[in-house]
Image (tube, grey):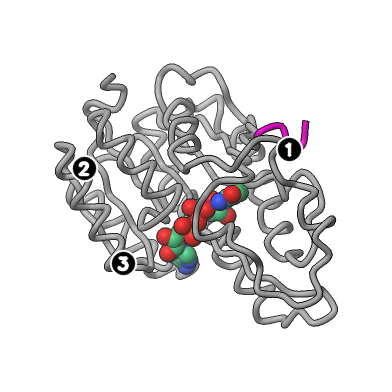
Amino acid sequence: MERFKDKVVFLTGAATGIGEATAKRMAAEGASLYIVDVAQTELESTAQACRKLGADVASQTCDVSNETEVARSVEEMLDRFGKVNVVGNVAGIQLWHHTCDHPTSDFERTLAVNLTGTFLVCRELIPHLLQTGGSIVNVSSTTALAGIPYSVAYAASKAGVLALTKSLAVEYAKQGLQVNCVNPGGIKTAMTKMPPVDDIDMDLLLRQNPLTPFVEPESVASLIAFLASDEGRHINGEHVRIDGAALA
Ligand SMILES: NC(=O)c1ccc[n+]([C@@H]2O[C@H](COP(=O)([O-])OP(=O)(O)OC[C@H]3O[C@@H](n4cnc5c(N)ncnc54)[C@H](O)[C@@H]3O)[C@@H](O)[C@H]2O)c1
């Protein structure tokens, strides 16, 4: 399949996990890629892997919560590729605390990366996506749809991503923009290691676990690619759970 032939993809969080898998998936399907992340070494590994798959790739260290860095990356991407067809907002962090001990700084940092970062990337790129009739896929979470303990900032940020997704879809659908999000749960990445919190109630923590074993990040990459491709074109303003029936 060459669903991304002649398409330019701007992808955040591409160093590891779901973002890395998404970059490789789109590279294998003909995309040119501009990938960003804060983890420089791993980001370069992803870029090299994508080049081996035949893709034209540029990578840039960028903290998505930093307005200036996002604007600089967008400008650099446009200088290099001249257009953008697909945006994938995958970058994210999850910090664990019992809520009564939750530092305000960690709450704000989580919102800054997961929600403000998604907003900033969308805001900077939408004018250019409107020129190509492009597509945005944001990464939300099952935690946007059902409660999770010890991670209120993360859950709130991901619910924000879901609401932002639907609002953007409504605001820009008539102008040809497509905006969806995916709601993963139980994906084998660095993020799904055991939380570093004392006195964990495992019953509460496991409420959102899939009914089937955890799966590799490629499964989410495949869903993101489908939504961003012409095959998924009429799906707009949707959120799609990919969680092994955890919330079914
Ligand atoms: N793994 C799961 O089960 C799961 C479930 C629901 C949602 N998600 C979401 O999927 C996305 C990818 O997570 P993952 O599971 O692949 O974990 P991951 O930790 O491997 O990937 C997150 C990536 O985001 C990058 N990142 C962190 N802060 C950043 C910043 N300020 N600017 C730019 N990049 C930054 C990290 O360096 C990393 O490469 C995240 O948004 C996460 O919330 C994952």
Q: Main secondary structure of the magenta part?
A: loop
Q: Secondary structure at mark 1?
A: loop
Q: Amino acid at mark 3?
A: Thr
Q: Which mark is residue 61?
A: 3
Q: Is residue 212 left or right of residue 220?
A: right
Q: Look at discs 3 and 1 and give the one toward the viewer.
A: 1
Q: Earlier in the sequence, mark 2 or mark 3?
A: 3
Q: Earlier in the sequence, mark 2 or mark 1?
A: 2
Q: Dot 3: few (<14), some (14–19), or many (≥20) neighbours within 10 Å?
A: some
Region rendered in magenta: 244-248
Image quarter where the C terminus lies is top right
Q: Position of residue 104 (x, y in %)?
A: 72, 81
Nearer to the camera, 117 or 72:
117
Disc 3/disc 1 C-alpha distance (Å): 34 Å
Q: Amino acid at mark 2?
A: Gly
Residue found 44% across the figure and 17% down from its top: 231
Residue found 74% across the figure and 74% down from its top: 97
Residue found 47% across the figure and 43% down from its top: 217
The reply to whether residue 64 is in sight is: no
